[in-house]
Amino acid sequence: MKVFLAFLKKEFRHVLRDRRSLAVLIGMPIVMLLMYGFALSTEVKNSRIAIVDLSKDEVTRTLIQRLDASRYFTVTEYLDNPEGADLLFRQGKARAVVVFQEGFQKSLLHTNTASVQIIADASDTNTGNTVAFYISSIIRAYQDELLTHQKLPYRIQMEAQLAYNPQLKSAFNFVPGVMVLILILLCSMLTAVAIVREKETGTMELILVSPVRPWMMIVAKAIPFLLVGLINVAMILLISYTVLGLPMRGNLLLLVAECGLFVLLALSLGLLISTRTDSQQTALFISLVGLMLPSLVFSGFMFPLENMPLPLQYISKIVPTRYFFNILKSVMIKGLGFSQVWKDTLVMAGMTVFLLGMAVRSFKMRL
Amino acid sequence: MLKALLNKEFRQIFRNPSIIRLMLAAPIMQLILIPLAADFEVKNIQLAVLDWDHSTYSQKIISRLGASGYFQLVETPKDAATAQEALDNNRVDMILEIPQRFERDLVREDEAKVYFKADAVDVMKAGLAINYSGQIIQQVNQEIREDFVQLPRFNPVPMLNISTQYWYNPGFNYRHYMAPGILALLLIMVGSMMCALNIVREKEIGTMEQMNVTPVKSYQFLLAKLIPFWLLGLVSLTIGLIVCFLAFGLVAAGSYVTIYLFAMVYLIAALGIGQLLATFSDTQQQATLFSFFFMMMFVLLSGLYTPIESMPLWAKSIAWANPVSHFVDVMRSVMLKGSTLYDLKYRMFWLIGFAILFNVLAMLNYRKRVG
């Protein structure tokens, strides 16, 4: 035990002495949360659009003014003909071009119809689609005003309820995502790199001839990162509760226990990587490619799982972050109890046992 | 002198085959995986239906939702509690409830209600799901109305014909949009991260000290580190472009010469960032963390996943000072829209500026350490 404590002290010194790394470790989740909270959104606003007004009458002027006044668009250019659209799009100066036909008002007055053409830059498919949708909504709204306000018969009313997140805060999705990412980074990648570092700098040899047992070394390596990980979890929860207005509906104890299980799982992964590599660069790359990338892609945090091609959906079933992300959302936001997440928990526990077993086996062989 | 150093660097890189393999495998994996996975189009909304009415019209609504392509009718729970449980457990994304006497109310009272309840944890998905269902309900409503009232064929009221054209990607192939952006991400990873780690490794295992006592000048040392990674970056880009073609059938609408010209400058900037990061860190662990942190910032604020124009002003200014955002835009413009060097000349000026700035900073910082 004395040996273990001494070794643990060494590891803590290693981590605490490296102020710069520590600053990044503690600062990264905060910065990420704030970025997701305040800078990133998929919402379309202030999109630049250009107008080709071949009519220049009262109606088109009103429509152009409405487009410009909406928070979605800013009219930045006026073109003489639609051919100029290509150059604008290529230089990235507009998202869409709206073309009003010649004699717009006249046509509307005499034949009760007039044509508007929307040309959208769909290279960014989602934004292009949304921009075109909003432009036509604004034009439709104007058309509805022209209609006399008569009540139509046989109305189906629709009432929609937004469960769990009535204020539509995107934080409900990204806070669990950031937590998953930070824990995987800390507990797998850094643990793997820290162990391999001893191999690379040659101090592993020294440890092997000392009375320190292999399990002591591993546990001692893991504990400081585990603590930093838990501090991060606490900080993330605090910030999301106070700054981002995220509710804490579930049982806090259950949440912490699940986080603990995931940390253990991540540590076993890191351990497994460290036993199979000799240089920090390789360990890092394996962690990045084999861990970070699948964690990001297959957790359901950034990309919707149900849209993926079937083979990828099957792969996602063996990625641990997927289960953890699910648990976090269920417990934190939906306020569900253990009886609803036991399946995911069981999968994670099974994975931990399997990975730990593999790691211990390869570790022994090396010794 | 430089030649000898370059010789050493190349040997070091090629002697570690696992690094080379990973460096080539990583881009290909990312390039194939992310565009395949990044399908944000909202379809397959899992729907549970509680139909208390069992009438012709309620059936009509349900079948129209199912046929729209956006919804999948996965459950017909027997009561509200079971439906709620399905929503809790992520088995369904939305519940549709059609109350008793729906059809009767519609015909007799002129008005009837349907209720939707959507899982709004994923805001974008819930919003779109409700939007789509609203559109479909409206269509059904119109058809039902036409059963009762004969609407005149002619236009009695003003109608605006809106036609929409979608340019450059009319099939809405999201993969074609994602892949060029991912390439920009790959280049900065190869450029900055690998280069930073490589330099810091020399510090950590002590060979930097030896280097410092040789007559090697600082610019020679940095140049010798820069050139191999610059070439590797271009090789990665080439592989990436080939993968784009083979996996997604994506061929540049513009000229590949433009792409390579931009990539050459961008890589120099990326390597400058890597060298700068290296001067700030003493161990590979630090370098890893720093590059990870900056990569994250660069990527999140690059417009790769979310459009820059919807960011607040402070984030927009950071995005302008971010080489990744310029190159992401260049790749997309050239690959999809066929933009020319002239169209993108301001981007080029920015990138040249970054390349000079970061490398000069790295050089200055490095010299201090030697002295």
Image (cartoon, rainbow, N blue to C red):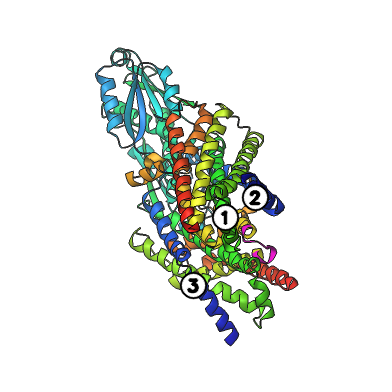
Above or below, A264 against A101 in this view is below
Chain letter for mark 2, please. Answer: B
Q: Position of residue B90 (x, y in %)?
A: 52, 55
Q: Secondary structure at mark 3?
A: helix
Q: On the picture, is A97 further left or further right than B82?
A: left
Q: Is residue A275 magenta?
A: yes
Q: Secondary structure at mark 2?
A: helix
Chain letter for mark 3, please. Answer: A
Relative depth, front residue between A262 and B83 = A262
Reading the image, the residue beneath label 3 is A227
Indicate which label's residue lies in the foreground, 2 or 3. 2
Measuring 62% from the left and 69% from the top, which residue is drawn there?
A: A198
**Are both tags, 3 and 1, on one chain?**
no
Q: Is residue A197 magenta?
A: no
> Of the residues shown, which amino acid type is indicated by label 2?
Glu
Number of residues whose C-alpha sits closer than 10 Å to that of mark 1, classed few (under 14), some (14–19) or many (20 or more): many
Above or below, B102 against A120 in this view is below
Reading the image, the residue beneath label 2 is B9
